[in-house]
Image (cartoon, helix red, strand yellow):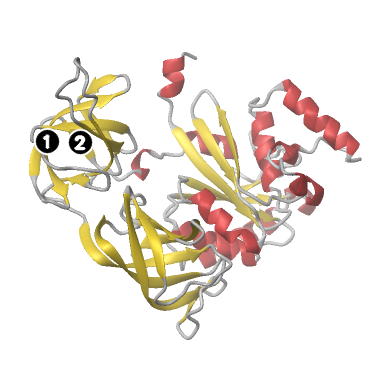
Amino acid sequence: MTAKGYLDMDLLRFTTAGSVDDGKSTLIGRLLYDSKSIFEDQYESIKRTSEQRGEGYVNLALLTDGLRAEREQGITIDVAYRYFATPKRKFIIADTPGHIQYTRNMVTGASTANLAIVLVDARHGMVEQSRRHLFIASLLRMPHVVVCVNKMDLVDYSKERFEAIREEFEDFSSKLQIPDMHFIPISALEGDNVVTRSTKTNWYEGPTLMYLLENIHIGSDHNRIDCRFPIQYVIRPMSNEYHDYRGYAGRVAGGVFKVGDEVMVLPSGFTSKITGIDTFNGEIDEAFSPMSVTIRIADNIDISRGDMLVRSSNAPKVSQDIEMMVCWMSRTPLKLNGKYAIKHTTRDARCIIKEIKYKVDINTLHRLEDDNVLGMNDIGRITVRTTVPFFYDSYRRNRITGSVIIIDEGTNETVGAGMII
């Protein structure tokens, strides 16, 4: 494959989630090994480590569990990212922890993903963490969810057990908003239905996990309707060759921008026309999400980082009072009337927590309106007031312009991830 062909390939970002010991890291190791995406010396290294640990098999989980504490306990503690490619598609995997106290890590790994793989132990079925992970996948508007019923070898590849777990998941997910859901019976340890089809599950007629990952449609996952271009940087070379050049660099967050289109600048409201779109490889006629480009316009308007180019006929909401669902990530609880720094696209501001409406009981999906203390890993609905207006869409409509992060100004720690309602 040529370098250009590799760069032009689709990129699928996916995350794995599941309870402790459900086999997330083993599944990723199996995907990498069976798809021939690891080098021989990597395989020999984990083979030697497995032998030193007295394990009677090559522990593929060691490919992602790199921290000493992870290997000692046989668990995943932090989000581990792996990159691999097949002839059809490129992949970025986020292997997220299974423990309840690491729920925030799952939010981090899932926030940019197209697809979530939720693992469940065939012996145990749906557990509390399964409900938590499905709820987070729904909250983060994951377009695709694949439920992998793992360790089928330990239940004699029972079709009845697989169908019972499927019904359990479908019953719970009917209360959520998950547009595309798949179920696959697998054994990550043995490799059944991961990359190659298993002869032990002849009753299963669906695709293998790898086939699904390679062929699932992700082209419509990006918002191509609402034109949003947050300005990251103003480019002014001031050189002899580009003496009068002025371009606005950023990443397209939605819609399609074409040369000749009329655009409006927020917050000023001034309008102009696009005269050129530049990339590292030269000029192009149109740009769409998630491309990073530099846009030139006809008029000299005062534009700086944090401003946004949109269409006059399709502008985002503009407000300083914003309602959102928030996953709290700090050991210090969220403070009502507390002051925090807040980031939205390329815009920085400060905010005050005006109201904590309720906390969500993830197991029952009930709203706990009497409990307004949001501690670490809790999820709730809040209202904030920002020091400057934000230009935003609902998270359901656009995951980029509908998300914020909340920062403790004293420690510079990211304490909350918000999804605007």
Q: Position of residue 245 (x, y in %)?
A: 17, 25
- How many other residues sit within 10 Å of disc 2, few (<14), some (14-19) or many (≥20)? many
Amino acid type, callout 1: Asp
Q: Mark 2–mark 1 contact, CB under 8 Å?
A: yes
Q: Which residue is mark 1?
A: 261
Depth check: 20 or 400 in front? 400
Considering only vertical position in the picture, is 383 above or below 197? below
The x, y position of residue 369, in whole percent, is: 45, 83
239 relative to 72 in the view: left or right: left
Left/right placement of residue 336 relative to residue 402 reads: right
Neighbour tally class for label 1: few under 14, some 14-19, many 20 plus, Cα within 10 Å: some
Cα separation, mark 2 vs mark 1, equals 7 Å
Residue found at x 25% / y 61%: 388
Secondary structure type for disc 2:
strand
Can you tell which quarter of the image residue 343 is in? bottom left
Residue at the (21%, 60%) spot, across then down: 318
Count of all numbered marks drawn on residues in the image = 2
Task: Work out whether 319 lies above or below 283.
Answer: below
What's the amino acid at mark 2? Phe
Task: Report x, y in % for residue 91.
Answer: 52, 34
Answer left or right for 99 relative to 336.
right
